Image (spheres, grey):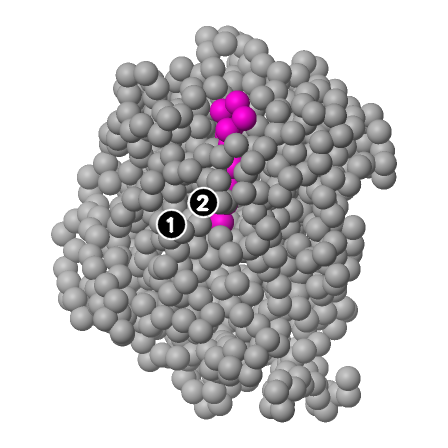
């Protein structure tokens, strides 16, 4: 790689009292002669060197950019008041639903501002409470977390998955629950895995062999399902399924039915569609039997009823259905409908007490129905309001189960549910220091560019005047079959209580209306997602909730792509853009870590000239135009993000800074010891405070809280 311009600015030329509209002197970023050729078309990539995020030169660039960014943020007069108010609203006790394992009930509690939830247990619901695991003690700086906890069937053993610095990589530590003593060695190189216990002798898990090479650039390294026998070294673990044989599989996961009769293995090459395999563990030397041998649809074995397997699938059912099949004769040709497809898509399926709980989505809100194992509907469960319910998981012998209900202004509340009677009893409601009666949530439907009807939730304080001057936070995602449903975060209340509007549209690409809604926002249909988002903004402006001078657009990961594409296509539409950990280089995304698995949604620039041209047309990095006034932009990423690598954000920031013609700031905030999600609560609140402060400041608004915290 030949250097064409060797300009490294070591000095940061930024005043600490920049007012909105003042020009910022950014650190000059080195440009190099680097390019890729696609189907005869050469595409320059002058900031390619920023892809090496472990290089000294990149670290120096990060330090200079952070110095500029934090100098700007530090001089916003109400930034600290926002951070203080976030703490106040977050400082309430939160309790998780109890789960019975062995003789104990386990649950988490957070007193309010603890970086991580503390896990407690008690013998019987009326027993004495004791701390079981406190992740806040894992590291001095609070960046090591508990990422999962998996009990053996009798509850005598538990395996903890440990996450460090926000990375997707995990370590596994097994404890005896009686005295919390460690059993055997720590397992390493685990990623995107659960733990499936077989008796008390060992468990199944997934791992990679090449974590260092996989950290930045993709290499031929595929997921394996292994069996680990306790008290033996990881090096002797038996490979049960090798994802690199035949068609390479990037992910493979193991699941055991509750009776430990069947081992189920699901494998995938992208984020959509999976194979299924089953092995009868009660038969010596039984082999894996193929249930599904293609990746065209999604399938999930949710339980067994003797030799019958109960499967959630969208095969010949875009909205999903439940089928049954004999484990010994289980090809899709022998599947029989147990719970047929409904007009509403299935979001989730769980079992408890030999009942099937199906969570449907009706215009992006939860509807829960209870069925028996013969597929007969027993009841629709009455929920407290319009919102999102989750949980309902348990064991065959359970007579009651717990679930959580939440909405935009309804803090997550746990209910105990009696399976026989259908009675819900409130178990734990958090006491959040705000009055939900002060706020209104409405669901509207607007029309996108091609005439598609799209739903959107809008939340605001009662008495709001539609004068076009309300600061509005438009948040979206639109991808990977993920549904955005009503949910509560205390941090959002800071925006709302200070006169802000929050809007959440259900864009195509998500799963709100089933498989067809998802596919309508993928590959050569991806522009539909951006059109839906733009139409949502135009609706809010037309209805005078806000105007372009008071609109902020926000999203993370695939939602960061959404923000990047929207702001480069319509820079006039919003005042503030907040792309977080975004996929911003659509020509090279598949060359990093797990990026190749996203091809089912995006396609790749290598697969065809048509796909390359389509990606090139909307890729945020490649659509930044010279001498264009872009909105005030705060890009956020983290140094340990090994899912959407920070190079996306680095290159996008450098390109925007180079070409920004207006006086709106273009800043990048790079968190340390954090990943695709914040590694602890304090870091998460820091990011939110900076985003709110940046948005209000660039809208020219001093939020009311600033007057109460001079």
Query: Which type of secondary structure does the marked residue at label 2 adopt?
Result: strand
Which residue is denoted by mark 2 in the rendering? Answer: 313
Span shown in magenta: 298-309
Residue found 59% across the figure and 50% down from its top: 293
Prevailing SS of the magenta stretch: strand
Q: Can the viewer see residue 386?
A: yes
**Is residue 303 found inside the magenta-colored segment of the image?**
yes
User: In the picture provided, is 225 more to the left or to the right than 272?
Assistant: right
The answer to whether mark 1 and mark 2 are in CB contact below 8 A is: yes
Q: Residue at x 65, y 86 (%)?
A: 37
Please tell me in which quadrant of the rendered image residue 598 appears: bottom right
Q: Is residue 689 above or below residue 449?
A: above
Residue 695 appears at what percent x and percent y?
Answer: 38, 64
Q: Is residue 384 above or below residue 66?
A: above
Above/below status of 480 relative to 462: below
What residue is disc 1 on?
317
Q: In the image shown, does 692 or 408 lie closer to the viewer? A: 408
Residue found at x 52% / y 53%? 273
């Amino acid at each position: 790689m030949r250097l064409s311009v060797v300009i490294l600015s070591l000095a940061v030329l930024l005043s600490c009292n920049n007012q909105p509209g003042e020009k910022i002197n950014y650190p000059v970023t080195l440009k190099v002669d680097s390019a890729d050729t696609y189907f005869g078309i050469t595409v320059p990539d002058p900031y390619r060197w920023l892809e090496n995020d472990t290089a000294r030169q990149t670290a120096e660039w990060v330090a200079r950019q952070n110095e500029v960014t934090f100098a700007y943020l530090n001089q916003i007069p109400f930034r600290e008041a926002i951070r203080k108010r976030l703490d106040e609203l977050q400082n309430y006790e939160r309790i998780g639903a109890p789960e019975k394992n062995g003789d104990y009930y386990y649950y988490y509690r957070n007193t309010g501002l603890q970086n991580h939830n503390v896990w407690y247990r008690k013998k019987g619901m009326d027993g004495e409470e004791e701390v079981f695991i406190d992740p806040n003690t894992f590291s001095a700086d609070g960046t090591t977390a508990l990422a999962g906890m998996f009990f053996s069937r009798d509850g005598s053993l538990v395996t903890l998955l440990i996450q460090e610095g926000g990375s997707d990589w995990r370590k596994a530590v097994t404890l005896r629950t009686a005295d919390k003593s460690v059993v055997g060695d720590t397992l390493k190189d685990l990623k995107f895995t659960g733990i499936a216990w077989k008796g008390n002798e060992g468990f199944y898990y997934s791992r990679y062999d090449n974590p260092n090479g996989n950290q930045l650039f993709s290499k031929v390294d595929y997921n394996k399902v292994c069996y680990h026998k306790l008290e033996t070294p990881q090096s002797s673990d038996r490979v049960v399924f090798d994802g690199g044989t035949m068609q390479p599989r990037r992910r493979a996961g193991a699941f055991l039915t509750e009776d430990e009769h069947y081992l189920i293995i699901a494998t995938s090459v992208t984020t959509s569609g999976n194979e299924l395999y089953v092995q009868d563990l009660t038969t010596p030397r039984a082999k894996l039997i193929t249930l599904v041998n293609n990746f065209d649809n999604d399938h999930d074995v949710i339980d067994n009823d003797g030799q019958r397997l109960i499967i959630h699938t969208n095969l010949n059912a875009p909205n999903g259905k439940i089928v049954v099949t004999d484990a010994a004769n289980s090809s899709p040709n022998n599947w029989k409908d147990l719970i047929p497809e409904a007009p509403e898509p299935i979001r989730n399926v769980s079992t408890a007490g030999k009942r099937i709980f199906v969570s449907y989505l009706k215009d992006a809100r939860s509807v829960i129905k209870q069925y028996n194992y013969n597929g007969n509907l027993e009841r629709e469960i009455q929920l407290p309001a319009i919102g999102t319910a989750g949980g309902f998981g348990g064991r065959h012998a359970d007579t009651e189960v717990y679930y959580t209900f939440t909405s935009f202004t309804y803090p997550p509340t746990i209910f105990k549910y009696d399976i026989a009677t259908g009675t819900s009893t409130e178990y734990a409601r958090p006491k959040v220091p705000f009055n939900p009666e002060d706020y209104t949530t409405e669901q509207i439907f607007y029309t996108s560019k091609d005439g598609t009807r799209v739903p959107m939730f809008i939340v605001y304080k009662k008495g709001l005047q539609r004068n076009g001057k309300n600061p509005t936070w438009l948040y979206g995602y639109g991808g990977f079959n993920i549904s955005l449903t009503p949910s509560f975060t205390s941090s959002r209340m800071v925006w709302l209580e200070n006169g802000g509007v929050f809007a959440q549209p259900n864009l195509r690409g998500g799963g709100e209306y089933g498989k067809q809604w998802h596919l309508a926002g993928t590959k050569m249909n991806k522009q539909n997602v951006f059109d839906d988002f733009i139409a949502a903004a135009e609706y809010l402006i037309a209805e005078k909730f806000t105007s372009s001078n008071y609109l902020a657009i926000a999203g993370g990961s695939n939602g960061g792509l959404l923000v990047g594409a929207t702001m480069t296509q319509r820079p006039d539409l919003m005042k503030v853009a907040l792309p977080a950990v975004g996929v911003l280089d659509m020509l090279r995304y598949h060359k990093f870590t797990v990026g190749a698995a996203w091809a089912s949604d995006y396609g790749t620039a290598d697969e065809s000239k048509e796909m390359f041209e389509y990606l090139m047309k909307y890729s945020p990095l490649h659509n930044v135009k010279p001498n264009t006034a872009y909105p005030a932009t705060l890009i956020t990423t983290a140094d340990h993000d090994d899912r959407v690598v920070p190079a996306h954000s680095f290159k996008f920031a450098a390109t925007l800074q180079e070409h920004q013609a207006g006086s709106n700031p273009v800043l990048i905030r790079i968190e340390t010891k954090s990943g695709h999600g914040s590694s602890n609560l304090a870091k998460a609140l820091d990011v939110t405070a900076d985003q709110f402060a940046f948005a209000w400041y660039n809208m020219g608004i001093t939020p009311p809280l600033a007057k109460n915290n001079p």
